[in-house]
Amino acid sequence: MKSIFITLFVSISTLSVIGQLKGLTLEDAVLGYYKGLYPESLRNLQWVENTDNYAFVTAEGLAIKSAKNQKTVQTITLSELKNQVASLEYFPYIEYINSELLVFRTPQTIVYYNYKSKKAEEIAYDTQGENIDIDYTTRNVAYTLANNLSVITKGGNKTVTENTDKNIVSGQAIHRFEFGIAKGTFWSPMGNQLAFSQKDETNVADYPLLDINTTPGQLKSIKYPMAGQKSEHGKTGVYNVEKGKITYLKTGEPLDHFLTNTTWGPEGKYIYLAEVNRDQNHMWLNQYDVITGKKVKTLFEEKNEKWVEPEHGLYFFPNNPKEFLWLSERDGYMNIYHYSTDGKLLGQVTNVKWVIDDILGFDNKGENIVFEGTGEDPRELHAFKVNLKSKEIERLTKEPGVHHVQFNAKFDLIIDSYSNLSTPKQINVVPVNKGEKIELLSADNPLKDYKYGTTEFVTLKSSSREKLYGRLIKPHDFDASKKYPVLVYVYGGPHAQLVTNDWLG
């Protein structure tokens, strides 16, 4: 079972200055980011692909540094970029960087900038385009225009679908973003084929929403399948870039079942779908041939009289296209299972009674799996590794709190960014095995000159003795002998953990 979280807020209303401390205003709360009231961080921090260098944006530009000795390898300035891309007004967000190339976007173009040769290639796209999905190896780009899908390749701009019926939508996320679905396009490993989701919303009722951005407000309709009413019909197409041909997977009936967790096989020959019935209590993991669209086989099924919810695709082993990892809650908690592509269960890798959030990858030898999860305290988030043979689990992030991690390509170094109730922001480079961590940033408390309430954790028990985690926020000048108005905020359940051990909760 997943924990239910309760958040308790005690109202704060003290604006007068006591001593030298300043009062927090509503304006401070709304505009705090722009007023410097958020902890300092490192902008656009990321690993340089397949190296032990990392990059982040500074006032001077993009700094590339060595994680081993902290020496600056190179700095890429805005003026340098403007020599190639004159339209730039500020340093852009870097979407991808390797040992010689970085990729960013302007309002009109996708820019591939070679910072070794100092040459840029710009690829124009429709400014109305949305859901942009770039394959950085081939430089192929997928994007949507209204309810249709297009791609940009070396041969130019190509229209993939030409739906004249507005109820037919291609290339966007389907099934209301449930089951871990976050997008609707999926490039193959070689970048020469594009799988995409398509939905037919003809049978879905219109639902009115009030647009408050106009005066007076206007009603706009969206498609929303209410419980018990007719739902959309999902399809999965595969577009061959070279042939300009679409093949639709023969996913069969009933037409309103859910097509989720789209995963390409490593060799680009097969697509795997976790298909769920409308009652959401039965799942089939199916393999499809991308050339014919035919179903090859069902690898396995999962059933539960209450609920089945696949949230992750398949994680294939490096250099082994015949074996993969699968995340499942079949035993009541999200755990990792080891399968072969013939559907044989090769073993249960973890057997924890807490939440595993995602698999991050494998170490260089493929002996350990790296993943993230809460650990024993559901208010936290940590990185772990588990040995495939011994099944021993080691927590890699040691300090209490909520950790956001990035691993280098060899999975032997971590960029670890975390906070907790008493730590505004700490960023370190941490060796996975041996060695000392290197501090990149230790942020000061941006509210040290302000009056703000103390935050305390509380733990309650439900009637069934389940732990309910809460957060109690008291005013700066709290007096236990007085009565205060109380705001009780309750929201909890799957995927909605709000009581966490991070800065200011």
Image: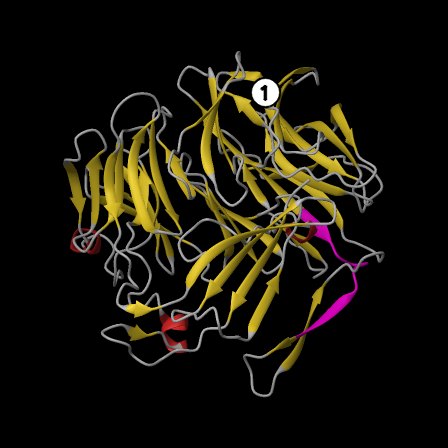
Q: Residue furthest top?
A: 389
Residue 246 in sight: no
**Could you tell me residue 503's position as x and y percent?**
39, 54
**Could you tell me residue 352's position as x and y percent?**
60, 28
Name the image quarter holding residue 117: top left
Residue 353 in sight: yes
Q: Is residue 421 left or right of residue 21?
A: right
**Could you tell me residue 211's position as x and y percent?**
61, 77
Q: Residue furthest front?
A: 481
Q: Residue at x 74, y 69 (%)?
A: 207
Q: How is the image coloured?
A: secondary structure
Region rendered in magenta: 198-209
Q: Per the image, is 429 magenta?
A: no
- Reading the image, the residue beneath label 1 is 349
Compared to 338, does 252 lie above or below?
below
Q: Residue at x 69, y 59 (%)?
A: 164
Compared to 269, does 126 lie above or below?
below
Q: Residue at x 28, y 74 (%)?
A: 22
Q: Quadrant of the N terminus?
A: top right
Name the image quarter holding residue 274: top right
Callout 1: few (<14), some (14-19), or many (20+) C-alpha neighbours within 10 Å? many
Near-viewer residue (204 or 240): 204
Q: Secondary structure at mark 1?
A: loop
Q: Per the image, is 203 magenta?
A: yes
**Could you tell me residue 345's position as x and y percent?**
68, 17
- The three-letter amino acid code for the residue at tag 1 is Val
